[in-house]
Amino acid sequence: MQTAQMSPALQSFLQQETEAPEPSSALEEALTGGTLAPLGDLDITTGDSGLQGLEAALERFADHDVLRAVLDLGSDPREYGRQYEAQLRSAELESIQDYIAESDNLVALHGQISSCDTILASMEDMLGKFQGDLGNISTEIRALQEQSQSMSVKLKNRRAAEGRLGGFIEALALPPALVEGIMQSDVNETFQENLLLLHKKLDYAEKDDVALTSAALRDVAPELDALRSKAVAKARDFLMARIYALRKPKTNIQILQQNVLLRGKYLVTFLRLHGREVFTEIRAAYVDTLSRVLSSHFRAYLAAIERLQVPAAGPGDVVGSAEVATGGMMAMFAKGLAAAAVRDRSDAFQLGERAAVLSHLDQAAIIPHVATAEGHKFPYEVLFRSLNKLLMDTATSEYLFCLDFFQDQGVFSELFAATLSVVEGSLNTQLLEMSDLICLLLMIRINYHHQLIMTKRRIPCLDDYFDRVTLMVWPRLKAAFDLQLSSIKQCGNTSIHDSVQVHPITQRYAQLTSAMLILNADYQDGQLDGSMERMRYAAMDLMIRMSRSASRKRIGTVFLITNFDHVLTGLREAGVKASQLTGATQSSSGTATGSNLGQMGTDTMKEFEDQLSTCTNIYVEEVLSEHFSGLLTFTKRAEAANKARGDRADAPPAPGFGAAEAGPVVRDFTARWASALEQLHRDTLREFKASQTCGREVLKAAMTQLLLYYTRLLDLLKRCGPEGASLFRDAVTVPSIMYEIKRYNRS
């Protein structure tokens, strides 16, 4: 080997390698030496330990390829060991040559490894230092955390102390700007801002437990009280000047309230909290001022609208005759009866357009001087609506102002009491002389709807007033109804003097009833219905009594028919008007029924319809008996006789009512039916000349009844056998009679 050419490092490396024990397998050691002796030297009788060692080695290397090959071949182990050793020596030499060939690389690798070891050692030292530094930093962090927690607690405590102490100082300290703003500045928005700040300081000084016992408050209390006194004085002077300005003539109160007083409403709040005596003075001054001003305004307004009033009905305008209605309830109006009777107003009970006031409830109040200049006059209910409207608007404005400005409802109640007293006094005066039923009922309806309007506004300040007005008007309405009822009942000696004209009492009753039913249609007031029912009974009784004063019963019957028909016509027209006022839909025929007038209207119409039907039937029977007595007498008697016998409809006629007896009746009717019908037409229209429409309806009923009688006579002839059939053929045909009836109806 050329060892001289090797580097010292490689030589050293190889020396270390050669000095190491030669590699040998454990198997060879076991076979050639060590624990195993040569096979020739073995004594199988002795040396049990040798066999045991062999067994252990064989068991240990049972799976070794070399041992398995030696045992399989059966060769000499020594020989095989020597071969194996030679191979190992050869491989060792080859390995050394490989090492020598790679010596430079190994040297470089060794240098790199040494360099890496040096670097790693340096890094290990550095990391060790880092670890030490991190340990120090962790210690410092824990120290900083402890310091931070300590500082946080200190800061929290200092802030809490600062908050309490700072708030305390701020609440009690009096900045120069505050002192100057209260003592020297005018009363304006800035002054009110300073008042608010002063209020907070005063409130704190009065209510805070710490402040009450502090020395700081004792030092600042005199200055606080001085500022309070100055603020109260300046607020009083400002408010009193503005309140007294309301007393000036022609002052627009609402504009002054909204533009001046409300802008300084915190002055009142401050006085209420810190100047109670001055607040009471301001409150009293405002109440006194507005009470005088508003009551004076309404007193002047009442005087002005009183000149615009036109009386619609007076004490003498009663349904019954004024000449005889001088006792009972009429005595309370005796003073004005004579003059009223002379006037004899024909429109005193007509509703006309008076109900239109209910459609203009929220219209602006009447301006007296404008109405006077235009020459307008109004019934009292229109003036009452205007008065109530003005009162509502004034009360609404004043009520809201008092709540906003004084925050006290009692202020409004006190200042408006005088105004309500003036208005209610005027109403009482008017009601003492009021006997106009329509006006009184309209006042009740207006008052009711105005109360609803105030409820929708959510302004309850006039609820008591509306209730008092209702309690004032209702008794007067009942007294006026009793007056009318008494006037009807006391007309006991009234005579119609054989006149079949619609009586003035009937006209007035129809007008009044129609008006009352229209105004009560949507309300169904039971008390009013009871009064209407009593008046209806009294009016019907009076009409019947007046009909009995006629010289002939037939004239009295015509009188009743004419008067009942007039009342019904008025009620039907009232139903149409009521449907227009309430928006109800009329029937397809264009006529109205009592349903549009409420239940009382329905009952009233039915009562008069029944009476009219009864009187019409009486008149028809009488007039037919006059012109067709034979036909009516024979037909009625024959039907009565057949009914008494219990005959069927096709049974022969009763004795005495056969063809022989019917013949003269049929021939008489055939001979003169046309002329008799003409005479019936003339007589009926003559007797009903006061009401041609009513006369035509009665004539139609008479001709219809005549046709029914004649048809019944023909039915009787059919039961009389051949003789009856012969008479039937010669009789006038029903179509001929119907043609004439239609001709008269068309004319």
Image (tube, rainbow, N blue to C red):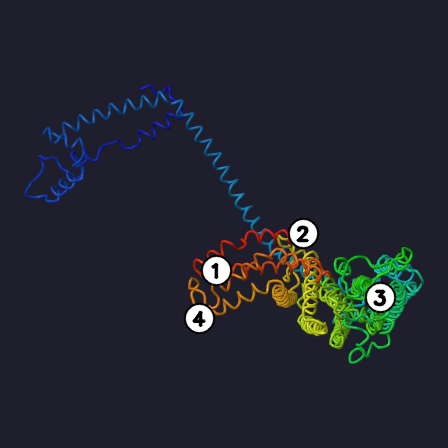
Q: Position of residue 474 (x, y in %)?
A: 74, 73
Quickly name the residue at label 3: 311
Name the residue tied to disc 4.
645
Q: Which residue is mark 1?
A: 717
Question: x%, y% of residue 467?
Answer: 74, 71
Q: Report the residue marked by disc 2.
A: 747
Nearer mark to the viewer, of 1 and 2: 1
Which mark is first along the chain, 2 or 1? Answer: 1
Compute the Cα span from label 4 to label 1. Answer: 17 Å
Element at label 2: loop
First in sequence, mark 3 or 2: give its number: 3
Determine which quarter of the picture holds residue 237.
bottom right
Residue placed most toward the observer, 217 or 59:
217
Q: Is residue 127 above or below residue 191?
A: above
Q: CA distance from mark 1 to mark 2?
A: 33 Å
Q: Assign a secondary structure to mark 4.
A: helix
